Image (tube, coloured by chain):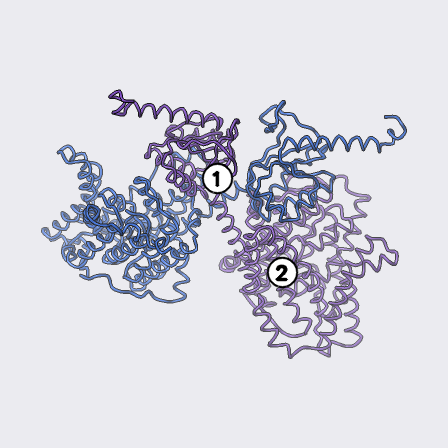
Chain colours: A blue, B purple
Amino acid sequence: MIRKFLPILEWGKGYGGAMLTNDLIAALIVTIMLIPQSLAYAMLAGLPPEIGLYASMLPIIAYALFGTSRTLAVGPVAVVSLMTLAAAGNVGTPGSAEFIAAALVLALLSGVILLAMGLLRLGFLANLLSHPVVSGFITASGIIIATSQIKSILGIKANGEAMPGLLRTLAENIGDTNVPTLIIGVLATAFLFWVRKGLKPLLMRFGMAVRAADLTAKAGPIFAVAISTLAVLMLDLESRGVKVIGEIPQSLPPITIPLFDAALWQSLFIPALLISIIGFVESVSVAQTLAAKRRQRINPNQELIGLGAANVAAGFTGGYPVTGGFARSVVNFDAGAETPAAGAFTAIGIALAALFLTPLLYALPIATLAATIIVAVLSLVDFKTPREIFRYSKPDFAAMTATIIVTLLAGVEPGVIAGVGLSLALYLWRASRPHAAIVGRVPDSEHFRNVKRHKVYTDPRILTIRIDESLTYFNARWLEDYVLEQVAQQPSVRHVILMCPAVNAIDASALESLEAINHRLEDGEIHMHLSEVKGPVMDALKRSDFLHELSGKVFLSQNAAFAAAIAIADAEENLDIEGDPLFARGMI
Amino acid sequence: MIRKFLPILEWGKGYGGAMLTNDLIAALIVTIMLIPQSLAYAMLAGLPPEIGLYASMLPIIAYALFGTSRTLAVGPVAVVSLMTLAAAGNVGTPGSAEFIAAALVLALLSGVILLAMGLLRLGFLANLLSHPVVSGFITASGIIIATSQIKSILGIKANGEAMPGLLRTLAENIGDTNVPTLIIGVLATAFLFWVRKGLKPLLMRFGMAVRAADLTAKAGPIFAVAISTLAVLMLDLESRGVKVIGEIPQSLPPITIPLFDAALWQSLFIPALLISIIGFVESVSVAQTLAAKRRQRINPNQELIGLGAANVAAGFTGGYPVTGGFARSVVNFDAGAETPAAGAFTAIGIALAALFLTPLLYALPIATLAATIIVAVLSLVDFKTPREIFRYSKPDFAAMTATIIVTLLAGVEPGVIAGVGLSLALYLWRASRPHAAIVGRVPDSEHFRNVKRHKVYTDPRILTIRIDESLTYFNARWLEDYVLEQVAQQPSVRHVILMCPAVNAIDASALESLEAINHRLEDGEIHMHLSEVKGPVMDALKRSDFLHELSGKVFLSQNAAFAAAIAIADAEENLDIEGDPLFARGMI
């Protein structure tokens, strides 16, 4: 039991040797990559840069204790940073004391929500977001984030949570562009794009092994950081208006107690919920992808607990909402991390950097950090998936497009809400119109097939409807409509057979609808039968009054039902003939 | 086309004669019943009594023009009145000018919402409410309404939207009880209960026909109104503290323009949406029940338009939200109404009453109206359904119980929201764990059955999973987990066959999951095949890259798939033998 909640007990025994070495190497590489990334994402979220470092220490260790992925790297990520900016921006201006306090509360709330979902086994709620909606949301967020960084490349002011505000403020202030900043920003961006595309093949041409070349290329941002920092120092660019990161406190994360203010908590609850769900969905898909490559398994409900613990840790150590990041996890995996201990070593690496390296970062230009963000998030923008989805399913494409448009125009929160609403509306719409078919018997067989697709034998007195889905409250109303409509169209019908081979469940609403159909058919002197009812469904029906009230019978096979209905209809016709006055007078 | 939106064109031609007579008689009986009921429900909603009369005129005519039910009677109803009280109560104190203005806005907003849903064919959204949740909500509302009327029976003050507030204020003020009011209230309640249960059998014993006895009993409230009004006048009870209805303006409905105040509209939007949905669900189930008795059909989307028009009419003629009422519709039906013209005649009857009869109602005791409400709503309280649902389905029972508890403790709006949330959570939970089974071949047949329930033939190298439901974004994640879990448990597997006879659709999310499963199995050198894929599903798959990427094949029958997989596995084993060093050295 305890082992289930503390996966560390699983991999912890027998730890050491080669595993330790591999984890240490991976931690070193991830640490080098994380330093500029953590600073950059904190600034994207509107927070002082050191908060990005704080959010990369204790949360990683908390996840290492409770998470089930061996290689997931937890910390600040781009989309969650943007969502934090939007949510805390309603409380105070970015960078202000209230804003930072709101970010802490968001982390704690999000942690509590994730823990609660994990303990209540509510991981399935993440299914509320369909893949196309998530994909659309991430693409739109990537575009917003990249646009928001243009201001730092130009050295001007701009703000907004969505495209209209961002573009307007950028246009208004473009005259203030600082040329040295622009040069650094453009060079850094170009360099980072080249590192991403061109460095690895180059290194390999010079004889470096594939994996080493790959990891060197991943460390690209640290070169950009070093070179641009040196340039600022040597050319005294700060005096020419190039904004630098400035002084970062040399310290371990402070212990913080998030503000317990009921009104603040209430106003941040929905944003925290959205951050939790988006963070969880993203993190689980990264963790699943990496686990599958090594034939390992992750447990989504336990992942909620791991991410919840990480966010609670962020809330109490001066951080902001964190989740499993794609880029850092892949680097961790590729660098050979074998256990969550790699994460713990990364945390130690970041702690050492926070204590000793921050003075070296004083002259790091903000434009360089903006360049690392732009290059990182443009890889989130995905134009291939929309094309594929367009080809495969128009309704899914519509939900995705709407999510992209709402996110771009109105921001991340309206975007996620619209996405969930649309996915759900689409699902409901489909679920409320289930598949069903009028079937008849294939000649010389016991098989029954759709009358529209096959040449089959039917009887005008008998209507067989094959129901192809479970009956629930979503389609109960439809079922009533459909059956009564079919009966209304075929006035000769005396027997209706509902063929239920694909009905896996009938909920209380659908049971009520079946009862209503039975009574309404009875009012019209039509018998209702069931055939091929599955075992568990039959067991449930036996607990209700339905079987007593049913005007017809339940048959094991459709063939038996059809034969019996014909026999009864024949017998009734004979009875009618006997009751006929012509018959009584001997004229038939 | 125009005929579809104006059902009157359908039944209007050929109208006259016996139909006209029947409609006139029904209208007279419904009018007599409606006068006290309209006054009572308006007072329940916290509005002046005449607003109940206004809401019973133009809205009926608007519904008659656009609705599809021949016998539905539209007007104020108990549950919607309670919801109006709760919603408008957030804007002003009951009876105040702001409160009345809010009720008008609620009617208009609700009308616009219903019209929009009708024009966009969104009737399926009513499926969000499961039957048990609606039933629980109605029962809880009935209990709250009956409790809220005790104050008028006692002649004291009390208020609250839910049980805790109501019971507390009743207890605080019970010392102020007015004895003459109490006597009238108790006698009226007892009389009305007796009328409901005992009058019909009595009249029949005196030789009255069933239908006449039934309708006379239904007119019971008018006797209570007449007798108690006379008692007040003759015993001068008003001076003894018996509250009476007082002066009602003698007028036709005023033309009102609902306040166009953005903030007010925004704050009333959610309540109006809830009123619309509850009103629609109630009304449609009444209309469907009555239509089925005469083998008529109603069209839910057109019903939305009919009810929307009725509410817009209420908003512009001094009314408040209306919907199809159960009691009045049944009386209309039983009294022989044949067309919506009966509704129009009822509207004329109420108009005449509003113009000429209101002075007679001056001395009508409020306690009598309270008694009619109590007797009417107690029939909404249903203890049979919960028992049946408990027996049939525990999760549905849990959703119902939670809805009842939340409604009783926190009021109608939290009640509906909790109900929708719970229904949906329950549905999602079920939908995210679909049915699937590992199957094997029944010996000497081509049938494949669940390995857990039947003695079947399986091959350790082949895993066949029969998927019993459509694949959507709700269960896509589950599918990945389930397939990979099964494969992990059976290391000898070389071929996975997904048998899809019950898969009616695969949405874009599920397609992505199938692709992920395919790639992950391929990583483990396992082939993935599909069998018995339905035509439309296959057509959709052909529009994606999935079939090119699939490591195995798609087979028409499971039997063919199983045989082919065995053949390939055998061939591969032979190949392995040939590649074996022992084989090369001639030792095998």
The verdict on a common chain for dots 2 and 1 is: yes
- A12 or B246: which is nearer to us? A12
Q: Residues within 10 Å of mark 1 (few under 14, many from 20)?
A: some
**Rendered image quadrant of residue B197:** bottom right
**Closer to the eye: label 2 or 1:** 1
User: In the picture provided, is A352 more to the left or to the right than A261?
Assistant: left
In terms of secondary structure, where does tag 1 sit? strand
> In the displayed structure, does residue B444 sit left or right of residue A541?
left
Task: In the rendered structure, find residue A477 and report the number of the disc placed on it.
Answer: none
Judge the density around disc 2: few (<14), some (14-19), many (≥20) Cα neighbours within 10 Å. many
Residue on which disc 1 sits: B436
Q: Within the image, what quadrant is residue A253 found in? A: bottom left
Q: Chain of mark 1?
A: B
- Residue B486 percent across, percent down from the top left: 41, 39
Query: Residue A44: where, in percent of width, then height?
Result: 28, 52
- Depth check: give the residue in front, A413 or A539: A539
x, y (%) of residue A572? 77, 33
Residue type indicated by callout 2: Ser
Residue B81's disc is 2
- Quadrant placement of the C terminus of chain B: top left
Label count reads: 2
Residues under numbered marks 2 and 1 in contact, where contact means CB atoms less than 8 Å apart: no
Among the 4 quarters of the image, the one containing residue A313? bottom left
Q: Is residue A32 above or below residue A487?
A: below
Q: Residue A104 appears at what percent x and percent y?
A: 32, 61
Is residue B112 in view from this perspective? Answer: no
- Per the image, label 2 sits on a secondary structure element best described as helix
Q: B151 or B322: nearer the eye?
A: B151
Q: Which residue sits at x=23%, y=54%?
A: A347
Q: At label 1, which amino acid type do we have?
A: Ala
